[in-house]
Image: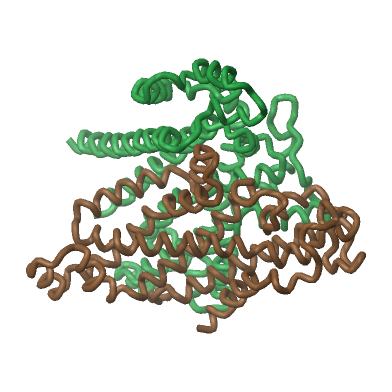
Amino acid sequence: MKRLLPALSMLVLAVAGPLLAPLPLDQPVTIPYGPAGTDGALLGGDQLGRDVLSRLLYGGRDLVIASLVVASLVTMIAAVLGVAGALHPAFGRFVERVADVFMLLPAVLGILLITQSWPHGGQLALVVAAVALGMPYAVRFMTAAAAPVVATGYVEAAVAGGERTWHLIVREVLPNLRSTVLALFGLRFVAAVYVVSTAAFLQVGPQPPAADWALMIRENSAGIVLNPWAVLAPGIAIGLLAMSVNLAAGALTPKVRNT
Amino acid sequence: MAGALTALRLGGLLARRIALLAALLALVFAVVEALPGDAADATADRGESAADVARRRVLLGLDQPVAVRFLRWMAGLPTGDLGVSARGERVWSLLAGPLPNTLLLGGLALAITVAVSLTLGSWAALRPGSVTDRVISASATAVLALPEFVIAVALVLVFALWAGLLPAATLAGPDGTPSSWTMLVLPVLALAIPQIGWNARIVRGALADEARAPHVRAAVLDGLRPSRVLTHHLLPGALPAIVTGAATSTGMLLGGAVAVETIFSYPGVGALLAGAVADRDTPVIAGVVALTGLVITCVLLVADLIRSWAAGGRP
C-alpha cells in the first residue's frame, strides 16, 4: 500500500491541478521566457510569456486521463480475450503469432502510422492506436496466467456441463485472476504514460495552445537557456508520474522469489 | 546428418522470421488502407483545388484497386522500392541518407545497453541482498519507465548547458553524418538509460534463477572463484533470457530514437519522421515502419541463433 501512495498523489495532483492554478492559462503574464519569479510567475514564463506554473498544473490532466482510459480498455478487453485464449488453444496460438508480429512494430512508430492514416481521428485515434498496440502482449500475459486456472477441475466440470464461453470467462475463471488483472492494469498504465506522452511530444495528440507537459517540453526547448523551468518543470512532472506509476505497478505485481 | 538437421532448423527459424515480417508489412498496408484519408489529400489542407488532389492521386497510383496497390507495394519492397511520398519523392531516396545515422545511434545504444546491463546485473546478482544489489535494482526500476525525451532534456540541461561538456545539438558534416563523435554521446545515453534499467533487471533475475540450479551449487561448493562460476556456469544458462531481453530492447531503441533525434536535431530517420507527421506523409511513415521491422527481424534472427546455439551446446 505504501508503494501505491506516490502514484495516487501524482494522479490526484494532475487531475485536480487546474483548480490550483494561480494565473490564467492562455494569457501572457510576463515577457517570453521570463525568468522565475518575475511578474508573479513563480516558475517564469513560457515561449509566449504565459505562466509556466499554471500551465504545469493544467498540463497533466489529459495525459493522466488518456493513460487511464487506454490502460482500462486494454486490461478489460485483454482479460476477456486472454481467458478465451486459454479456453480455446487455437485462439491462444493465433494471439501468440499476432504478438510476434507486433514485436516488429515499435509502439511509437505504430502510433504515428495509425494517427497519420486517420487524419481527423484526434484523441480517439490516439487512444485506439495505443489500445491496439498494447493488446497482443496483454492478451498473452492473461492467457499465460489463465492456463493453470482453466486446467482446474471445476472449470473442466463447467465446460463439460455445457456452459457458454462468456459465462466460463466472466463467472468461472476471471474471479480467480483478480490480482493478475490488477497487475496487468499497473503494467499497461506504465506503458500508456510512456506512449501517450511520447506521442504528445511528437505533436500527435494535444495541439497548441493546449497546456500539456510533453508539449510544453517541446515548445519551450528553444528557450531552455532563458527559463530552464519552462522545460525542467514539465520534465520532472512526467518523470515523477512515470516513476511513481511504475513503483505502484511493481507493488501490484504478485511477488516472485527475489533471490 | 547432424549438419543437415542444423541447416533444417536454421532454415525453419529464417522462414518463420520472414513470414512474420511479411505479416507486419501486410498489416501496415491494411492500416493505411482501412483508415480514412489518403496520402493525396493529406497535403490538400494548404488550399489546393480538388483537381490538383485528383491529379496527385493518379500520380501516386491511388486510383488503382486495393489488390493491385497491395501487390505492387509488397512486390516493390524486396527491391527496396518503398513507393512515393506525398510530395512525389521516392521514399527510398528520402530514407537512404538518414537511415544509416539512425542505425548508428541505435546500434551504439544497444551495445552500451548490453555491456552496462550485463555488468550491473552480474554485479548485483553475485551479491544478493547487499547494498550494491539494492542500489542497482532500485535505480534500474526508477529509470526503466522514463520516456526517452524526458531523459534527453535532463541530459541537455546538465551536461550541455550547465556543465558545458557536450554539445546539445548535432551538426551534420558535408556527408550528412554527425560531424563529431561528441554529438553522439547524449543521444545514445538518452536512448540507452531506460533500456539499461530494463535489461539489468532481466540479467539480475536470470542469473538469480540460474544460481538455484544444482550444477551451479556444485560448482560453488567445489570452491570455484565467483568470477569463474559466473562466466562458466551462470551466464551460459541465463543467456537465452538475456538475449531475448536485449532483442526486445531493439524495438524500444528504434521507437525512442524518433523523439530523441528531434531533441538533438540528429540527422536520422526520426527527424524525417517528425517532418512526415507534420505533412501527414503516410507513405514515408509506412516505409520507415517497414525498414524498422526489417532491422528488428534481423536482430531477432540473431537472438534466435544464439538461443538455438545455447540450447544445442548443452544436453
The correct choice, above or below, for B284 with respect to B239 in the image is above
Left or right, residue A229 beside residue B43: right
Left or right, residue B68 beside residue B252: left
Q: Which chain is painted in brown? A: A
Residue plotted at (70% across, 73% down): A19
Q: Position of residue B269 (x, y in %)?
A: 60, 35
Which residue is farthest front? B50
The correct choice, above or below, for A147 with respect to A116 in the image is below
Along the viewing direction, whichever of B226 and B91 lies nearer the viewer: B91
Q: Position of residue A18 (x, y in %)?
A: 69, 69
Residue plotted at (33% across, 58% down): A139
Along the viewing direction, whichever of B203 and A254 lies nearer the viewer: A254
Which residue is farthest bottom? A2
Q: Position of residue A216 (x, y in %)?
A: 72, 55
Q: Which chain is painted in green? A: B
Visible in this render: residue B110? no
